[in-house]
Image (tube, rainbow, N blue to C red):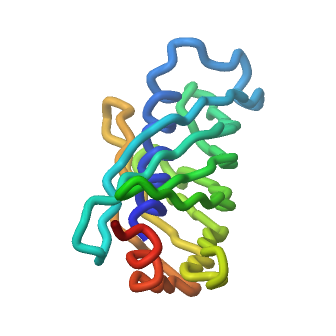
Amino acid sequence: MNGKRIVHIVFILSLVLVTGIAIKPASANTPLHYEEPVNSFFKVINECGYKIIEHDLGTLKSTFWFDENGDMSEGHQRWDITSTWSANGKSLEFKWNEPARGWFVSYHEGYIVFTGSVKITLPGQGVVSWDSGQTTYYLQRNNHGEISIGDVIRETGTYDTDWSAICAYLSP
């Protein structure tokens, strides 16, 4: 699902934000907690043949830990995000349940693990999209402290979307 990848990107962007924050905890063991509002629009890659726009609205809650050098060593995030797909004057709403945990095994290398589910239900039709599982990405941090997401290392679970039902529901 395209939205899953987008939220993963939001996680990475928040990691980049935190590593750029000048105010860091006084102690390496003191975590930094913050909440970030999410209000974003994206084009959904789909099989319908028309444009679907995703609107993500909610809160990203984060906790980050730093090592003795002040570099982020671990982070946990939880989404409270509702997504709305809109096309042709119609809309479809669903919630994310996908907490994440990221950590570095050295200054330059780390991992992010996303575990959770996203379920889309249509009135009178039931569940038409069910993404449930775990995805692990490789993280890299350069000498300037900038973090980037790497390849998918492991992906398990069920990722099933009935585009014909979604397309019919959102069609003109």
Residue 110 horizontal/vertical position (percent)? 49, 55
- Quadrant showing the C terminus: bottom left
> Residue 68 appears in which quarter of the rendering?
top right
Q: In which quarter of the image is residue 138?
A: bottom left
Is 75 on the left-hand or right-hand side of 38?
Answer: right
Determine the residue located farthest toward the left in the rendered image.
49
Q: Position of residue 20 (x, y in %)?
A: 44, 23
Q: Can residue 74 be seen in this view?
A: yes
At 66% from the left and 81% from the top, the residue drawn is: 124
Residue farthest along the front direction in this orientation: 172
Where residue 74 appears, as percent x and y from the top left, is: 63, 45
Above or below, comparing residue 4 to residue 153 in the picture = above
Decide which of 163, 148 is in the foreground and name it.
163
Residue 109 can be seen in this image: no
Residue at position x 62%, y 34% from top? Answer: 67
Number of labelled discs?
0
